[in-house]
Image (cartoon, rainbow, N blue to C red):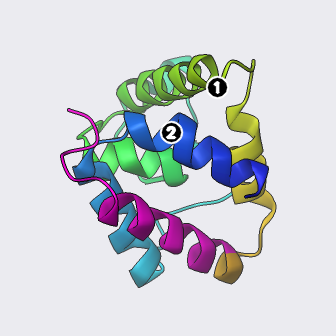
Amino acid sequence: MERWQRVWREGLVPRLSRRSLQALKTALLRDDPRLIQKRTMTPPPLLGLHDAEVEAACALGLCGWQGDGCATVGALEAYFDELCTAADEALGEPAACRHFLDWFDATPRYTMRRLLLAEVEHALDNTPTPVAA
């Protein structure tokens, strides 16, 4: 298992809601242009934009935005920070999320979509109860 997959499976998936995984699955299947690489979200999480509505997001951001209803930049930034911090703590490695995020940003879109879709489906298929509230 590659490092990004371990971070995804052990650090992130247990902290993602089933709704958020379903939303990510839909975005990956449809090649939704709102699923972006190399940025956390659009507009960017700048102080003056915290009340702005989210227009696009990375995989983790999309989970919070489309799956869990974080509609504003400020709400999504808080969700993203909490998710990454919890995953890092669970894995016992500072900034462990970077392994997933770096892979997500650096992998060509077609390949990223194919591999991440398989991981999302694995998570959905192997979770007998909702992943997280």
Q: In front here: 51 or 103? A: 103
Would you say 126 lies left or right of 87 here? left
Image point (69%, 57%), residue name: 104
Residue 15 picture quarter: top left
Q: Is residue 1 above or below residue 72?
A: below
Residue tagged 1: 91
Image point (68%, 18%), residue name: 92
Query: What is the quadrant of the C terminus in the image?
Result: top left
Find out whether residue 120 is within the magenta segment: yes
Q: Is residue 118 above or below residue 100?
A: below
Residue 93 picture quarter: top right
Q: Nearer the viewer, mark 1 or mark 2?
A: 1
Residue 60 position within the rendered picture, expressed as x and y whole percent measured from the top left: 50, 45
Instruction: Give the mark nearer the N terminus: 1 vs 2.
Output: 2
Would you say 53 lies left or right of 31 here? left
**Helix, strand or loop at mark 1:** helix
Q: Residues within 10 Å of mark 2 (few under 14, many from 20)?
A: many
Give the magenta range. 112-133
Residue 28 position within the rendered picture, expressed as x and y whole percent measured from the top left: 46, 74
Image point (54%, 48%), residue name: 9
Residue 20 position within the rendered picture, expressed as x and y whole percent measured from the top left: 31, 50
Residue tagged 2: 12
Q: Which mark is residue 31?
A: none
Query: What is the quadrant of the N terminus in the image?
Result: bottom right
